[in-house]
Image (cartoon, rainbow, N blue to C red):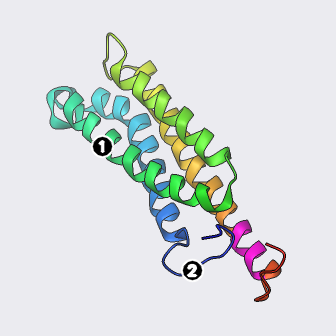
Amino acid sequence: MDPRIASPNTEPSAALDAVGGSASAVCAVHCALIPVAFALLPSATHSIVHSRVVESFFITVAALFATFVIGHATRRHREPLALLLLLIGLVVMALALFSTGHSHSGAHALAAACGGMLIAAAHWSNWHSTKRWRQSLSGSTDGDESGL
């Protein structure tokens, strides 16, 4: 099927980008505020929030969700910026999580927050690329597929 021809079952969903972008932004805020929470609540440093396993789980879920949404949409609109931002964001998040000496220090929080914001930016870029793709479909396909 020609990727320029949309059908209801194959169109990238703007709602998924909204969910992904919002979740990534919330994640970035969470990562930035964790050091503040630890400073205010010293006993929280041993809580489930500080767990590498829990953090790994959330990063994995976010990575799978974002890769599915952005990868699916990029096949349609063919603009690579969102995929590039996603890749960089995932690498930054992985480095923050799996670097030696992992702790919820300022450097870890900054790297994790930057990774989350890059993933949010990837969803935002994907949303705009999908919007432009849909506009090009409505403007260029009037039922005449002879030029495709």
Q: Main secondary structure of the magenta part?
A: helix
In the shown orientation, is residue 39 left or right of residue 113? left
Q: Of helix, strand and loop, which one carries label 2? A: loop
Res. 7 mark: 2
Q: Where, quadrant-wise, is the C terminus in this rendering?
A: bottom right
Q: Which residues are magenta?
A: 132-138
Q: Quadrant of residue 141?
A: bottom right
Can residue 51 be spotted in the picture?
A: no
Mark 1 or mark 2: which comes first in sequence?
A: 2
Q: Dot 2: within a 10 Å radius of its alpha carbon, few (fewer than 14), some, or many (20 or more) residues?
A: few
Query: How far from the left and from the top, in percent, is residue 74?
Result: 60, 55
Res. 58 mark: 1
Q: How many marks?
A: 2
In the shown orientation, is residue 50 left or right of residue 116? left
Three-letter amino acid code of the residue under disc 2: Ser
Three-letter amino acid code of the residue under disc 1: Phe
Which residue is drawn at the image coordinates 28% and 29% (left, top)? 38
Q: Mark 1 or mark 2: which is in front?
A: 2
Going by the picture, which residue comes out furthest to the top? 101
Q: Nearer the viewer, residue 4 or 50?
A: 4
Q: Quadrant of residue 108?
A: top left
Query: Is 22 above or below relative to 104?
Result: below
Query: Is 47 above or below relative to 79?
Result: above
In the shown orientation, is residue 142 left or right of residue 19? right
Query: Is 91 above or below relative to 1?
Result: above
Q: Nearer the viewer, residue 6 or 52?
A: 6
Q: CA distance from mark 1 to mark 2?
A: 32 Å
Q: Of helix, strand and loop, which one carries label 1? A: helix
Res. 133 mark: none
Can residue 108 be spotted in the picture?
A: yes
